Image: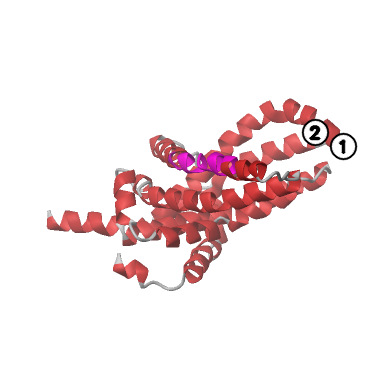
Amino acid sequence: MEDVRRKPMVWHEAVAAFREVLSDPGRTLRFAGMPAMVMLILYVIIALTHPRPAEPALEQAWEEEVLPFYLLPTIFHYWFYARMQIWWARWVLLADDGVAFLSPSLGRRELAYLGWSLAAAVATLPVLALLFPSLAVLNGVMVALGMEMPEAVVNALAVAAALPLLLIMAGVYGRLMVGVVPVAVGEAGSFRQGWTATRGLALRLTALNLLTVLPLLITLVFSRLTDPVEIAASYAVSVGLYGVGWGANAVMLARFYGLTLGRTRRQALTAG
């Protein structure tokens, strides 16, 4: 664990993860594979056949209409995520990139990885529950002082209260996901072992988690587009950004695993 603490600055680690993903576009494309392609096609079809209305008053009805159509591309979305996480982990830890673009690559390993990832995400939700008591206390203080808060102020305070909690959630999720990485290479996952192996590294994992998923946040700028062609084009860009972000995140987690829990397991095998 001391070796991890002596590694270069967090920013350099994040850049190294992105460099790994971007250094071989062909490998990144193969890892994304068929699920990413099908997801993109489905999203483009929805964008062209059910364009977002330009008038805000019509948005709710539009959302209710198109919501069922998003179920299928969402399935491929998470399939795409699992492929990127698993194959980048296998590349970093085993130098294995033997998956073809059109290979379905959906089996027990992928389903197990998705299940573990979902469980890790759910495990962070209790942290968010602290937001509501915080806002209630703040509102009570304002009422006691006879002060009324404009809606804009309430929203700003909610964001300010949520931000540290989201950072905590990112750190918790990162530590748990280190215990999920071994699932990608055919070993047993363990939240407990991942948590123990990353003790003292929560801040570093939080920062790396946020830095490596920055490309995903860029896709938020496309959320207000209304022109069908622009939306379709934005989906193509978004798939690329998701691939880069998920890939960098997977590389980072795999390297963290190799230096913490993976090292512990190797030492245990050697001692045995």
Kindly report the distance in space between the C-alpha atoms of the residues bearing marks 1 and 2. Answer: 7 Å
Q: Is residue 66 visible?
A: yes
- Residue at image coords 74%, 36%: 45
Kindly identify the amino acid type of the residue bearing the numbered disc 2: Glu
Q: Residues within 10 Å of mark 2 (few under 14, many from 20)?
A: few
Q: Secondary structure at mark 2?
A: helix
Outermost residue, left side: 272
**Tag 1 residue:** 55
Question: Residue 107: which quarter of the image?
Answer: top left
Q: Where is residue 211 drawn, in percent x and y?
A: 54, 61
Task: State the image coordinates of residue 238 (x, y, percent, origin top left).
Answer: 66, 50
Colouring of the image: secondary structure
Which residue is located at x 46 percent, y 54 percent? 250
**Residue in front for this viewpoint, 92 or 57:** 57
Above or below residue 148? Residue 264 is: below
Q: Is residue 190 visible?
A: no
Q: Name the residue beneath numbered marker 2.
A: 59
* Corner quadrant of residue 25: bottom right
Mark 2 and mark 1 in contact (Cβ < 8 Å)?
Answer: yes
Q: Is residue 162 left or right of residue 151?
A: left
Q: Position of residue 132 (x, y in %)?
A: 56, 39
Q: Which residues are magenta?
A: 123-136
Residue 110 rendering spot, x and y as whole percentages: 43, 39
Most common SS among magenta residues: helix
